[in-house]
Image (tube, grey):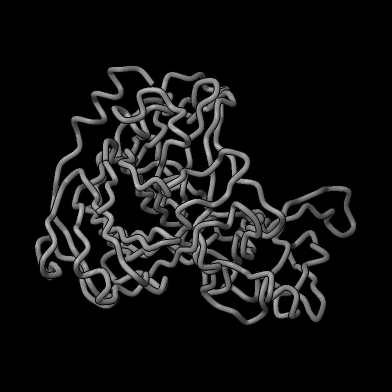
Amino acid sequence: MKTKNLIKALLIFAVIFTSCTHDNQVLDPGQNDPPGPDISDKELIAKSVTTGPVIDGVVDAGWNDAPMLRTTVTVPDPGNLVFRGYEGNTNDVTLRALYDNEYIYFLAEWTDNNHSLNRQTWYFDPDESLWKQEDRNPTFNEDGVMIRQPFYEDKFSMLWNVNHSVANWDTNTCFTSCHTDLSKDDGYARHYTQAGETIDMWHWKSVRTDINVQADDQYQNDDFPNGRHGDDKIGGGYSNNKQDLVMTGTSETVTVPLYFIPGMTYYYWITQDEIDAGTAKLITEVDIDGKLTYDGGVIDPIVETGFQREGSTTGAFGIPSIFTTAFIGSRGDIIAKGVYTGSGWILEMKRKLTTGDTEAQDVDFSALEDLAFGIGVFDNAGIAHGIKAGLLLKFE
């Protein structure tokens, strides 16, 4: 990343205080701090415990004595309109950490005024008689005014240096792999490392992974221009809920949903269990007027208007963009559960101190040494994220 972009991003960060200690309370800066622990804006002190907390998104008493890191993340402007509509947005964040003989535990809490689950939902466009998906990016008019919100999910990420392989990591942390001077063909802004360097990327996703009580265990390497990859897996994971079908009586191919659940309203994912049980139905045909045939019936989106847009959002029968099941293998190493409080998120995560990873994709905490890291908050965003670099994990 160019030095000027790094300096620019770092300068826009500010420190604003926030805390939340129960799943039903409002996140309010400076209020309801647990008794005892010091508060830092850079260092996260992991407290030693005999037994760790249950990972359920509820802040139990075991967290009360854990020192708190409190900071603010800000969305930078990397140029080329890459983060358009998000630049300058902020979220107040608190972090706590615990560890025992086998696991490390993290508690992340951050402010967020909206519970974003409506991720690229399918809807029917009656004007064009086509099934479409909402855009993950904001929509702007010719004057640059946002006229439709993005349709995505909330996410949280942590980045770690694997085996001390990344040069200058302790100084730059997550900015080390951020490159914003790329061409349009290369995506303008991407993450990749230098040869032989690997970053462990923990990526919790409110729609795609939370239902499975997991975060997405990923890594970044030196593949150009996109070094982001998922850890090795044996099975499981999330998939796009879409397929290409030839419209009945024509030779034209269109893209439509793959599965849906009859009668279900305001749902944003389909689980593999629902598919296996027959609750979710496979769509097998599409007519020229948009009717969808499935095992057991037909969707007529002209009559059933809940499949259409409803003003600024989607209708009650909007169809999810993904189906999902738990990762099996290294990609499922991180146990995680988030709870939305009405004004923000509570996220608990748990991972073994050492995973026994043979592919050098995971950070190893077992030495209990100081480790620099960075965090990102994605507020209803695909790629735009508030960043806080230069944080330091220490063990009590």
Q: Indicate left or right for 140 with 225 as reference.
A: left
Q: Position of residue 31 (x, y in %)?
A: 10, 67
In the displayed structure, would residue 130 be above or below residue 83?
below
Give the residue displayed 26% in from the left and 56% down from the top. 95
Q: Indicate left or right for 375 with 200 as reference.
A: left
Q: Position of residue 70 (x, y in %)?
A: 19, 52
Numbered label tally? 0
Residue sitting nearer the eye, 187 or 24: 24
Q: Hey, which quadrant is residue 321 in on the image?
A: bottom right
Image quarter of the N terminus: top left
Give the residue displayed 37% in from the left and 37% down from the top. 84
Residue sitting nearer the eye, 343 or 110: 110
Q: Indicate left or right for 129 with 84 as reference.
A: right
Q: Hey, which quadrant is residue 333 in on the image?
A: bottom right
Q: Position of residue 177 (x, y in %)?
A: 43, 28
Q: Position of residue 147 (x, y in %)?
A: 38, 48
Q: Indicate left or right for 93 with 138 as reference.
A: left
Q: Visible in this render: residue 382?
A: yes
Image quarter of the C terminus: bottom left
In the displayed structure, would residue 41 be above or below residue 275?
above
Give the residue displayed 43% in from the left and 49% down from the top. 366
Q: Visible in this render: residue 149?
A: no
Residue sitting nearer the eye, 47 or 168: 47
